[in-house]
Amino acid sequence: MNLPRGFRYAATYAGIRKVVKSDLALIVSDTPAAAAAVFTRNRVVAAPVTLARKNLKASRGTACAILVNAGNANCATRTGDKVALETVRAAAKALGVKPEQVLPASTGVIGVEMDASKIVETLPKLVARLDAACFDAAAAAIMTTDTVPKTAFAEIKSGRKVAFVAGMTKGSGMIQPNMATTLGFVVTDAAVSPAVLRSALKRAIGHSYNRVSVDGDTSTNDMVAVLANGASGVKPPAKAFEAALTSVLESLARQIARDGEGASKLVTIDVEGAANERAAEKIARSIANSPLVKTAIAGSDPNWGRIICAAGYSGAAFDSRKVDIDMQGIPVCRGGLAADFFEDVLKAKLDEKDCHIRFALRGSGRGRARFWTCDFTYDYIRINASYRT
């Protein structure tokens, strides 16, 4: 694992969680970095999202730090804006940077007042712990119902020089990013302008976080941010940087789906032959979000009727007589009708940890989309029925 140069990380327990484990993390660039971010499209927006947007605009796309807490969303509260501003100002003072160069992020329970003093009083200890080797500690600190930390890495080669890209994310439930409860943070020592960063992030998100769903819920706190400090001296072509960024974000998105609350299987859905990419994405998303499809996968039931049904109400136009469906590489539907297959054989294949669904439309359509989701098990209900308690 090669981490980008010029970044340091820290994590500690600030008393925000009910259980004693790290709940506060800090990501710092040693020099001001180009910055870009995408945020939730939920109409109910958490205070840190509002302030992060404002700070990015005020700094003209630069940032020095990301301050993240877990255990409290700081959303739908009386003091949310005040808490976000107070903690950002305290972090900026501790780091010796401008407040608008600090991006705040929060995850956790909505509607519970947050005590800013817990973060403010912990910041000196957090700053003192900053170290380039604490990347994994920061990734663990931002988790909520996640069972494992989620990280991904890539390299961009330019002659004899190499720039590194590293990402961390959290997310297990309330997942259907509309832009990313998920938070994602990517750092790179490549030299990339804010404009190129924004453009690359927007496209990369479209093929990663915007194509993952656990339960169809979009959080109030969703945020994916990228910092590029140029410490490597490598200024990669825009396409090369975007490819590396997309690779990291796709890996993180898959990890979110695999670690979905109560999930036992990662489901990859490929749609081919739609009228255009947007139509293909609609079909894939509809299949991914269908509780009936997801429960069938949980039970290893090759019920392809649920798949074609979900595609039919996706809003995308297609002729059902031209539909072919494969599950685990086995044809189950041809021309909109049942195909002959050995159910016991397919059921055994559906017991595997990775499930693949191919939905193809015959004809000249070139629209394609890949989407990731997971199955629904009894544990999803158990986890979410007791989330606050």
Image: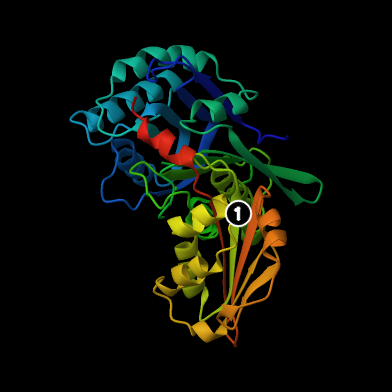
Farthest left residue in view: 78
Q: Is residue 379 left or right of residue 73?
A: right
Horizontal and vertical percent position of residue 21: 49, 17
Figure quadrant of residue 92:
top left
Q: Secondary structure at mark 1?
A: loop
Q: Residue at x 55, y 20 (%)?
A: 130
- Rendered-image quadrant of the N terminus: top right
Q: Is 287 rendered above or below residue 205?
A: below
Residue 23 can be seen in this image: yes
Mark 1 nearby-residue class (10 Å; few <14, some 14–19, many ≥20): some
Q: Nearer the viewer, residue 76 or 88?
A: 76
Q: Residue at x 60, y 54 (%)?
A: 300
Horizontal and vertical percent position of residue 165: 64, 43
Q: Residue at x 43, y 22 (%)?
A: 96
* Number of marks in picture: 1
- Rendered-image quadrant of the C terminus: top left
Q: Residue at x 60, y 21 (%)?
A: 131
Q: Is 295 rendered above or below residue 117?
A: below
Q: Is 210 rendered above or below residue 53?
A: below
Amino acid type shown at disc 1: Ser
Residue 103 can be seen in this image: no
Q: Is residue 347 left or right of residue 48?
A: right
Figure quadrant of residue 99:
top left
In this figure, which residue is indicated by the disc labeled 1?
300
Q: Is residue 153 left or right of residue 47?
A: right
Q: Nearer the viewer, residue 78 or 65?
A: 78
Horizontal and vertical percent position of residue 101: 41, 35
